[in-house]
Amino acid sequence: MSLPVDTIRILADRHPKPANIRFTYGTAGFRTLGSTLDSVMFRVGILAGLRSKKLDGKTIGVMVTASHNPEPDNGVKLVDPRGEMLEAAWEAHATNLANAPTTDAFIEALENLVKIAKIDLSKPSRIVYGRDTRPSGPSLVAALEDGFQAIGASVRNAGVTTTPILHYLVRSINTKGTKDEYGIDSEEGYMQKLSTAFKKLVAGKPASPPLIVDCANGVGAQAVDEIIKYLGDSLQLIPHNTATTTPGALNNACGADFVKTTQKLPPSLAQFLKPGQRACSFDGDADRLMYFYLDERGQFRMLDGDKIAALVAAFIVDLVKAAGLEEEIKVGIVQTAYANGGSTKYLSDRLPVKCVPTGVKHLHHAAEHYDVGVYFEANGHGTVLFSPDTQETLAAHQPSTPAQSTALNHLVNLTQLINQTVGDALSDMLLVEVVLAHKSYSGAEWDSLYVDLPNRLVKVVVSDIHIFKTEDAERRLVSPPGLQAKIDELVRRYEAGRAFVRPSGTEAVVRVYAEAMVRAQADELAFRVAGLVYDETGGDPARRPA
Ligand code: G16
């Protein structure tokens, strides 16, 4: 069987590639200005069909989102059958197809892919797809659907939904009727699964005070509205920033990325958050979560992905011990270079910690090597993975005391509460609430697990981010030559100083992270390193970071 070249040609001509743009499948798929992505969507539609054929007709997910990016951006990423990110080798195929300059070149690239990846075109192709609330979503989805039609895929439209729900659907569809069945393959099934596990885990605990949820004016608002119906009085959520149809509102001065990068309270919450009360922020597609509270002096205190990892890991370690499974189940942590030095020290004094490059795909794969792998990026993107062996151990273990039995049940319920396919703001929020309820912790008590080193994250706009190359899990630059030595020389001058530079995989910027013993020094170090980066690339002196 060969490719339906005639159909592909007719449809591809309706989605020409814009000249002079090079697309890259980056940290989380293709991501750039939505108005430039029409051809990419069409081509990804075909690629998803081929990926499904390659995997014997397993269902592949396609999510149209640009997550934390500004509203005019959009993007698309593929989800592999177990709900995880697309296999790395196929990222290169995606980039290759997206950049073919003409319809003829695109068809040639497709034929080439079929040959080198040995794709049996007679296999069926199945796809489930969804999008976030961005205004460019509907027209980009139409282009994607032309791609599905061109390759003759059987499709299911999940509509406007969160990225983690799409990942959940992919895994649920592919495991339906097997011993690994993940859940009922619908949004309702997802809500039911999470809320049932949550209620079991907090049963008998005093109800926590209400939680303010900043939905970033994105699709998370819809998911929060929905879960409220399922949670009943087990947890009271107060959604804010739910204006999903107000132009320009998405991720604007609100949401998880705003909180993490500015280390400030979203201004829209100022009149609602009282000292001591805890609140959290989702990002635009609800796969990241940041917590925060105001201390008794009204100062903003952030509880980021590192703090979530510390809270959750300690809780799981305690349960494993209480269940009598200390010897069988080992818990490990995965972080990136962005992890605060304070958290890395706290965690590595207690558990094995591994550092990997940015991107959930890297953390997820590293976490799979532990019995229970807790991974969180500092930006609030993360989850917990229970290995298949661990899940079997939990199912087979015979507790010898009532206390062991309770701890074992809690662990089993956690495997249901946690979305193990990818970082999930809603599921992670419920997880945090479970731990806080069990420990009777306020935000301040949670915060006091360890002290964060003051830190600063800065974006530098440079003419070409591709000249920046890193090694050692992105902690050191190998290119441009000589720049790392200059950074090292600067860092040496600051007490507890640490800084690194890496090109973003989701925005056209270079990111600079710095930390030091005191706030003013962390800020100064970040801006001085940013200045070095800027000078190196010969940017406009007027835009030099200062
Ligand atoms: C995506 C990735 C995250 C990553 C973030 C920023 O998040 O899934 O793993 O931390 O981008 O990446 P970079 O620094 O390379 O731009 P999201 O929430 O935007 O999908």
Image (cartoon, rainbow, N blue to C red):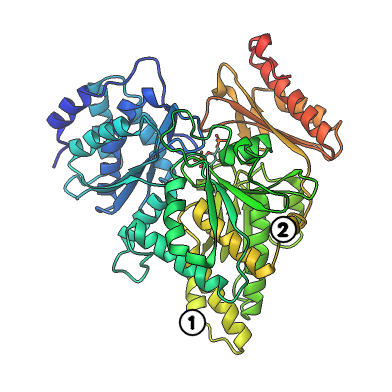
Quarter where residue 160 is shown: top left
Q: Position of residue 357 (x, y in %)?
A: 59, 42
| Residue type at numbered disc 2 | Trp
Pick whichever of labels 2 and 1 is earlier in the sequence. Answer: 1
Instruction: Please name the residue that numbered disc 2 is placed on.
Output: 446
Closest to the observer: 62 or 157?
Answer: 157
Tell which tag, 2 or 1, sits nearer the viewer: 2
Is residue 97 visible to the viewer in this orientation of the structure? yes
Is residue 27 toward the left or the right of residue 124 in the image? right
Q: Residue furthest bottom?
A: 400
Q: Residue at position x 53%, y 77% from top?
A: 409
| Residue type at numbered disc 1 | Ala
The answer to the question of whether label 2 and label 1 lie on touching residues, with beta carbons closer than 8 A, is no
Q: Residue at position x 12%, y 29% from top?
A: 6
Badge 1 marks a residue whose secondary structure is helix
The vertical placement of 329 against 480, above or below, is below
Q: Position of residue 505 (x, y in %)?
A: 52, 33
Is residue 84 visible to the viewer in this orientation of the structure? no
Quarter where residue 253 is shown: top right
Badge 2 marks a residue whose secondary structure is helix
Q: Quadrant of the C terminus?
A: top right
User: Within 10 Å of the Cα at label 2, are there few (<14), some (14-19), or many (20+) other Cα atoms?
Assistant: some
The vertical placement of 417 against 354, above or below, is below
Q: Position of residue 109 (x, y in %)?
A: 28, 29
Closest to the observer: 535 or 127?
Answer: 127
Rounded to the nearest whole Å, what is the CA distance between mark 2 and mark 1? Answer: 33 Å
Mark drawn on residue 396: 1
- Counting the numbered discs, the total is 2
Closest to the observer: 43 or 469?
Answer: 43
The residue at label 1 has a CB less than 8 Å from ligand 1: no
Q: Quadrant of the N terminus?
A: top left
Is residue 214 toward the left or the right of residue 96 in the image? right
